[in-house]
Image (tube, coloured by chain):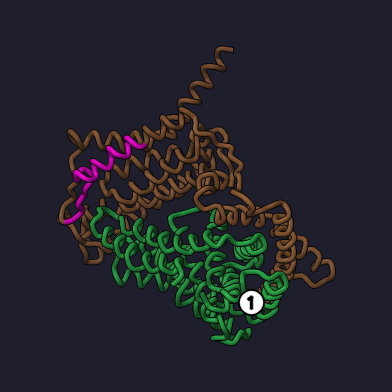
Amino acid sequence: MKRAENDSFSRCHPAVGIVFFLGAILFGAMIMHPLYILASGICALVYYCLLNGVKGIKTVAVLLPLVIVIAAVNPLFNHEGEHVLFQIFGRPYTWEALIYGASLAGMLVTMLLWMGCYNAVMTSDKFITLFGKAIPTISLLLLMVLRLVPNLLRKIRQLAGARKCIGRGAGEKSTKRQQAVDGMNVLSALISWALEGGVVTADSMKARGYGTGERSRFQIFRMTARDIVLLVLLGTLAAAVIVAIARDGTTAEFAPVVTAAPIRGLHAAGFAAYCAFLILPVALHVKEAIQWHISRSRI
Amino acid sequence: MKRSRILLLIVLLVVVPATLFLSTRLPGRSYYLMSAIVALEILIPFFAAYEKRRPQPRELVTVAVLSALAVIARVAIPLPNFKPTFAVIMLAGIAFGPETGFIVGAIGALGSDFFYGQGPFTPWQMMAYGVAGVLAGFAFARGRLPRKNWIMGLFCFLCTVIVVGPLLDTSTVFLTLSKITWSGALTLYLSGLWVNLTHGAACFVFLLLFGSVILEKLERVRNRYGMMESDENEDGV
């Protein structure tokens, strides 16, 4: 649950973030056109690396070979297509199956990268800001769970330590059976402690007037003019992409031969809108980096 | 009929089939997307009913504690896959009724994904964990099944291996298979079977050793502090 402090897009209103990620993931799952997948993949990759730094580059270095492996393996099981590259195990290895495998793997990895970006940008506080009004009870529950988990983990360490001190805990050398039984003992003790503690918390909530009126929420995010501009921009671009999908501008067939919708005329506009939509967080990030650089060089 | 149940029926009989029909009309790999949307749609009536009921703080905090316990059941025992998460969710369902069981499961899944990473599998997880709570709640309501350790353990094992594990594997099928075929799906279900068996075994052992102890603790809290309107839960929804 780390927060991407230096990212301009992460500091926008959560509504902008959710619209962007919903768009990126929904379009990503629907469009099979190889060029669209490539565009989405590049945007996701760049943004993921910007958000996660060196660690991000390492993850990407693991994921990219995965694409190649999935792409290379798919033709071994899938023999559809007319252009046979060579025969392997007595079966044809076709160009179409290879491209299909590459597209699928690209789509999968792109989704993983977008989800990685989502985890870095849409932190739990943003989630609760968005849903606090629509589902107040459920989001309060979620908030309490997020607070309780670290709290209970701390208590587990205390309980395990105390058990070890009286010679009953399981250590590194214990058998698996002992470790399992010890873990369950700790869990059982934790349950009693946590339930009792919960009742105290609840009484305190009641004493402070929980449920007597509409619950106010701590709001750190304000909808600024920039957020509204971004929302309108994202909405317009998404509408353009939807028009392209509806006019079959994003279709692709992989058997018997690879045929993808040509990117010309109106379809080119749809593709441009798709790229513009996806590049937005990277663009904001880069714009801010440049501004920062300029204002620093003036000093 | 209660309004929450009418909403559930509308979702199951109208909204879900409509979504499935729509999925046959959309291009690309929309089936994964649509399956996730279906999972979300199933969550809605349960969440709506819970919001509508305006639970008291004592109930709310207890549910939060149980969900948090389900999350950390993943961490408490340092053996891979040997996690009694479902056992905790099912005990919550048995002690407090199917509705609470569902909420504990769904919130537990969502909460744990904030720590371990959200993914396209999150809606599926929420639904599957919720289902675990509901099933246990139903099966043990009004003394339908005796609340003995080995019976709860066996039930939990069977639920995990037959229902909850395969539900989670289904999301893997939709997510990773390039073409959905029976043989491909079967391979994934079989490869998931080992994980499901260890999960199930963990739940079985946990309930066999601690089932009635923990159930007693939960029921004591419920009776002592008068939570969750016991007449409503004895009903089994």
Tell me residue A198's x, y (percent). 71, 62
A250 magenta-colored: yes
A167 magenta-colored: no
Q: For this rendering, which residue is in front, B187 or B126?
A: B126
Tell me residue A82's x, y (percent). 15, 56
B120 horizontally vs B56: left or right: left
The reply to whether residue A61 is in sight is: yes
The chain displayed brown equals A
Q: What amino acid type should be assigned to the residue bearing mark 1?
A: Phe
Q: Name the residue under label 1.
A: B206
Q: Chain B is drawn in which colour?
A: green
Q: Is residue A61 above or below residue B174?
A: above
Q: In this view, does B209 lie above or below A200?
A: below
Tell me residue B91's x, y (percent). 60, 74
Q: For this rendering, which residue is in front, A175 or B200?
A: B200
Q: Which residue is drawn at 67% across and 63% down?
A: B58
